[in-house]
Amino acid sequence: MDFKDYYETLGVPRGAGADEIQKAYRKLARKFHPDVSKESDAEARFKEIAEAYEVLKDPEKRDKYDRFGQAWKARQTGAAPPPGFEEFSFDFGGFPGGAPFGGGSGFSNFFEMLFGQATAERGEGWASWANEGRGGWARPGANREAQIVLGLEEAARGGVRELELGDPATGSGRRIRVNLPRGVLPGQSVRVQGQGGAGRGSAPAGDLLLRVVLAPHARFRLEGRDLHATVDVSPWEAALGGEADLPTLDGRVRVRIPAGTSSGKRIRVRGRGYPGSKHQAAGDLIAELRVVLPDALTPRERELFEQLRAASEFRPRGAGND
């Protein structure tokens, strides 16, 4: 998996505005600046933060990144690619006469422009297949995209999962193993190298990009990395206070219910929400309390409620509005 989630790097949601992105960048830049930070990986983190901000602050770059992920730089120009290179954008303006193959070194420069980054990351052997272009096009396989639907607990714990992939063209299928990162978020993509379209010639196969979708959960609602839940309390617990056990993704936690609690009051339990990632802390558990009554009152309960009504001077709707 080689996906860089710029939003997660800055700790902002995908719909964050420019001000929120700038605020997050400034906060992280101050924290991880190599001149002031004592973190062991400060320099690397600072570079990651700067890279993410450079893309997300620019509306045009951000739009390309949202649509094409890590391939957004290849979409910087708009010229039509030759057959099979639809994943790339071409700009021949840097070559004499506008033609990439016109001179002795034009061909190698052309492929260096296209695949130099891949060469730097994978080693010189990665670009060797490009030289086959002298006798006929060799091209990498196309990346494929698919959705993977996960339960909330399954996405939270991550781990290895086996998937069945079908080929609509041939009707055949194959099984692959995917190592899901712990705490993967909806909308993020998990890259499985070499499981995309087949390459031509000696070029490598493309990658499979699995976009994560979370199935609805019966109890929790995920917002960012915070988990939201509703907890029912009795009228006497709301009035007098008490304690309640709240469910979490990894057990239960006991919290105190303050006396005088009304429906809608929220209790926040730090760090007991959705798991964190390498660059982001775990979320919180946010429980919204809801005062509920029994479905049917016993004679004794009705008697006590009538006594309370007679004795109480509380007027929830104000004087004169009964």
Image (spheres, rainbow, N blue to C red):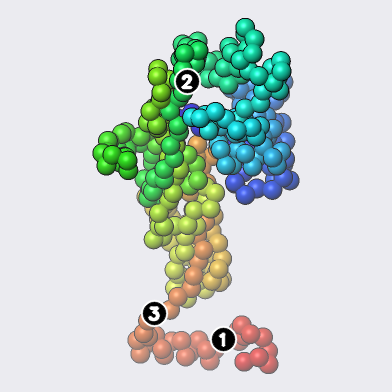
Residue matched to label 2: 137
Q: Residues within 10 Å of mark 2 (few under 14, many from 20)?
A: some
Q: Spatial distance from mark 2 to mark 1, Cα to Cα?
A: 87 Å
At numbered mark 1, what does the secondary structure look like: helix, strand or loop?
loop
Residue visible at 46% across and 17% down in the picture: 136
Comparing 171 with 118, the one in front is: 171
Residue 31 visible here: no
Amino acid carrying label 3: it is Pro
Q: Residues within 10 Å of mark 1 (few under 14, many from 20)?
A: few
Amino acid carrying label 1: it is Ser
Q: Is residue 170 left or right of residue 35?
A: left
Residue matched to label 1: 312
Residue matched to label 3: 294
N-terminal-most mark, 2 or 1: 2
Residue visible at 61% across and 15% down in the picture: 101
Residue visible at 47% across and 90% down in the picture: 306
Name the residue at the top extreme: 104
N-terminal-most mark, 3 or 1: 3
Labelled pair 3, 1 in contact (Cβ < 8 Å)? no
Q: Nearer the viewer, mark 3 or mark 2?
A: 2
Q: Spatial distance from mark 3 to mark 1, Cα to Cα?
A: 21 Å
Q: Residues within 10 Å of mark 3 (few under 14, many from 20)?
A: few
The quarter of the rendered structure image containing the N terminus is top left
Residue 219, quarter of picture:
bottom left
Residue 293 visible here: yes
Q: Spatial distance from mark 3 to mark 2, Cα to Cα?
A: 74 Å
At numbered mark 2, what does the secondary structure look like: helix, strand or loop?
loop
Residue 198, x across and y down, in percent: 38, 28
N-terminal-most mark, 3 or 2: 2
Residue 189, x across and y down, in percent: 47, 39
The quarter of the rendered structure image containing the C terminus is bottom right
